Each structure stands twice: as structure tokens, then as C-alpha cells.
Amino acid sequence: MASRFSGALQISNLDDFITPSQECIKPIEIQASKRKTGAKIKIEEDGTPITLNEAGQFEKLQKVEITLADCLACSGCITSAESVLVTQQSQEELLRVFREKKLQYQSDNGTCTVFIVVSLSVQAVLSIAERYNLNPEEAQHKLAGYFYQLGADTVLDMTVADDFALLESAKEFIERYKAAKEGLKNQLPMLSSSCPGWVCYAEKTHGNFILPYISVTKSPQQIMGSLVKYHLAETMGLSPEQVYHVTLMPCYDKKLEASREDFYNHERKSRDIDCVITPIELEQMLSEYNVILNEINARDVQRPFDSQIDNLRNVLYSHSGSGSGGYADFILRYAVKHLFEETDIVVEFKSLKNPDFQEAVFQKNGQRLLTFAIVNGFRNIQNLVQKLKRGKCPYDYVEVMACPCGCLNGGAQIRPLNNVQPRELALKLESIYHELPQSNPDKNQVVQNLYKTWLGGEHTDKAVTYFHTQYHEIKKMNTALTIKW
């Protein structure tokens, strides 16, 4: 199936390249030859099928294109229902929303019922910056200018959502660790849940065996959805359904995540994220309409959640650790501080069999107390799952990402030019990422202020509602085994 989703969703292809998986087989009608050739079909070395024609000569069969709509919905990768939801998040759909808003604005004397918010992820911004030879801040401000030009009402930075995701994940790990040590419930290792490709694969392939280990903290994208739809909207006197929320993300799988039923408010008929757009799609939009990003008037991103905090810089922020958000690094430091009262530690993740499988250990008085890992790419994910099934997984926490090199090499990041290899580009983006100012979630005044004023504390039901979720086993259908063509 021609797909641009992550390798973890393309489970028919065990290669770690973020390319379309092996093509599905779609039956086609072949006109029967007048000659009694039987089933004389040959497959050439390149996989092309050929058959005997009426003249008794071999000729190539027409190549059949297959789309997600043709899928048997076997839950092996993407179901047809999911494909419909993803189609609703195309660049064409986004531009349609912008056009309709402008028409409504013109026809209703300057009033409009739709408030469009665009949230920018740092990984996607870095991809755009590299493609158009901009520094990260310039890229962020040019993107803000472009979306305002299209008709956005507010363009936001996602640092606050990133920090909430890290803090909530760290607190969840502490609870799991203490429960395991007290013999109440052992759900270690805790596996990160911010990568929807990994989560979707886990739900469909390993189900209830693996799900108890997966963190219930929402990803930064979905936390941003809660912030926009249920905090920002309220402060502006709007209801969630009046806000159209767009995110710029490095991954097609984020479209699937945004489409999950868990993130749809049936009472309000509103999704937390209405549309996910990616760097590749943004590049296509710019090219199709002959827009030169470098010539766009730069605009600042807005910081409505920071309005009561002074002296905050309007810049792009990174986090210590991996370019995927630094989950393993932050949670390890947080755990060491809150479990063992150590604050001055050196965290060093060392590669094991390959650069996408890394491990860090915290020891005290010669005793190994915590073992963390970073696992990127489908092959490494499979190895991790097999360790778990054999009961030989030595880790307390694992940061899991479906894409090799993590989110900076997401499947929807703009592909490298001039024969540059994807890993080479990803390493370059990671270097740029770590040159950015770093946000420390523990010291983020905006986050602490929102815990107090919006959520009523750090461990309230409101915090759980907006920042936590659940994952579900999705059983495969055996449809393909019973269909007769």
C-alpha cells in the first residue's frame, strides 16, 4: 500500500526506511485469452507481472494503483475508516476552511463564527528552516506570517504543551515505580505514548499484553488541543466548536492521533485537533501557489498562556535529551530527584547495537537503581517487545519512537536534497535543535500558573481529564481469509 505513515504502521515491511511499504495486492479482471493458456502468468525480477496475450506473446499486465480506500480494513496497518478521517486533514481541506472563513467575513460585514488557531511544533519548524535556508526563529516567524496571511486568528508555540507532557509523564512514572516497589501493581517498564505510530501498532498488534505498560499521558499535540479548546477558547468567550485548531507536525501518524475517538467531544461535536498539516504538505502548498516563504512578512507567535508572566522571550525552545522531546532524559532526572534525592547527575545515553537503541543507567553506591532506554525504529521496537514477552526487559522506562532518529526524522519532514542521506539530515537537525534555548518544565512559570489557575492543582480530576487518555486493543479481522473474488 502506498503510504507515507511511519514504519511501525507499515508492518508488512520490516525495513527501517520511512518509505511506502510493500504494495498490497488488489485483484483485477483480466480478459480471458482465446488461446487456452491456462494460468500462464510470470513475475519478472522487478516484480512486474506478465501474461500471455492472444498472439501467444508475453505482455506486461497493467499496474494497479491501490489506495487506503481499497484496504480490507484488516487492522494490519491503516483501516479504511481511518483513511477517511485522515483525508479530512489534507492541505486542500485546510485551504477550504481558510477560504470559507474569508467569504463569511466578507458577506457578514466583518464578523465570523470560526476562530482559527495554528500551533507549531519545533521539529516541523526546524524542517522548514532547513529547507528554506532560514534560522529556526526566522522560520517560526515566517510561518506565523504565512498562516496569518491565509487567515489564521492566532499562531502559537507549543512549548507549554511539551512541558506539560514531560511533567505529567514524569509524575506518572513515579507513581508506577512506587506501586511496583510496594508490590501493588507492576506496570514497568513504562513506555512512552507520544508517538502515535508506535501506539497504533501496539494497539493492533500486541493489544492487552502491551497496553498496560504504555503511558496514559497525552502527547504534546493532544495536550495542546486541550489547552486551545478548553482554556484559550474559554478566556476568549468562545465554545470549543467555534475554534478550528490546526497543528503543524513532523509526522503523518499525528493525523491518525487527532482522529482518535478518545479526542472527540461528542457533546460539543468538536475534536481537540481539527487538522494536522505537515512540512511536506506545507512545501506543496507554497509551491502550488508560488509563495516564496522567505518573502513573507515575519510575525510573532502569540503566547496567550503567558500573558501574566513577564520577561518571556518570543523564541523557539528545545529540551535536553533527544530531538523527540527529551522524554527519557527528563523523566530520568526527575525520578532521580524525587526518588533518590539526587539533583546533580550526569545523564549519558550510550548506543548499544545501533544508534537508535540507547541506554542510560543511574547507580548509587555501586547499585543500579534505574535503567532507561531510547528505542527508535520498527526493528528496535520489535526487539523491545520480544524482550518484554520473554520477561527479560531490564528497563524501567523506554522512550519509544516509530521513526529511526525519532521525530526530527518524522515521515512527514521534508526529504533531504542533493543526495544527502535521511540520517545525515536528521543528525544536522538534532544539532540545530540542541543549539536552541532549552525549556525546563520544572521551572516553567507558565505551566505552574496554569496548574494553579486553570486546573486547580497538579493532581486534580480536571488535570487527568485534559492531560490523560486511554488506549485500546484493536482486534484484527480475518476478512481477507474468507473473501472470494
Image (cartoon, rainbow, N blue to C red):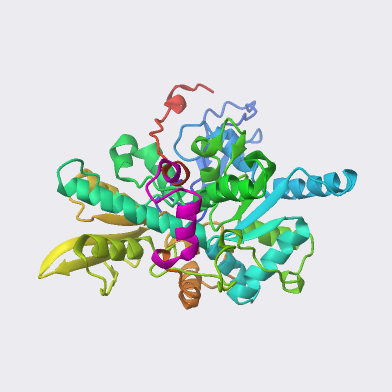
- Locate residue 90, reporting x and y percent: 66, 47
- Answer left or right for 288 relative to 314: right
Which residue is more in the foreground, 51 or 171? 171
The residue lying at 56 percent from left, 29 percent from top is 37
Q: Is residue 450 magenta?
A: yes
Quadrant hosting residue 323: bottom left
Quarter of the image for the N terminus: give it.
top right
Position of residue 445 relative to residue 28, above or below, is below
- Locate residue 393, reporting x and y percent: 21, 52
Which residue is more in the foreground, 270 or 188? 270
Please identify the residue farthest to the left as the structure is shown.
Answer: 366
- Locate residue 147, reporting x and y percent: 71, 60
Q: Is any atom of residue 178 visible in this view?
A: yes
Magenta stretch: give its range.
Answer: 442-463
Quarter of the image for the C terminus: give it.
top right
The residue lying at 40 percent from left, 39 percent from top is 470
- Locate residue 418, reporting x and y percent: 59, 74
Q: Magenta region's main secondary structure?
A: helix
The residue lying at 53 percent from left, 47 percent from top is 226
Which residue is more in the foreground, 247 or 228? 228
Q: Is any atom of residue 379 visible in this view?
A: no
The residue lying at 42 percent from left, 54 percent from top is 402
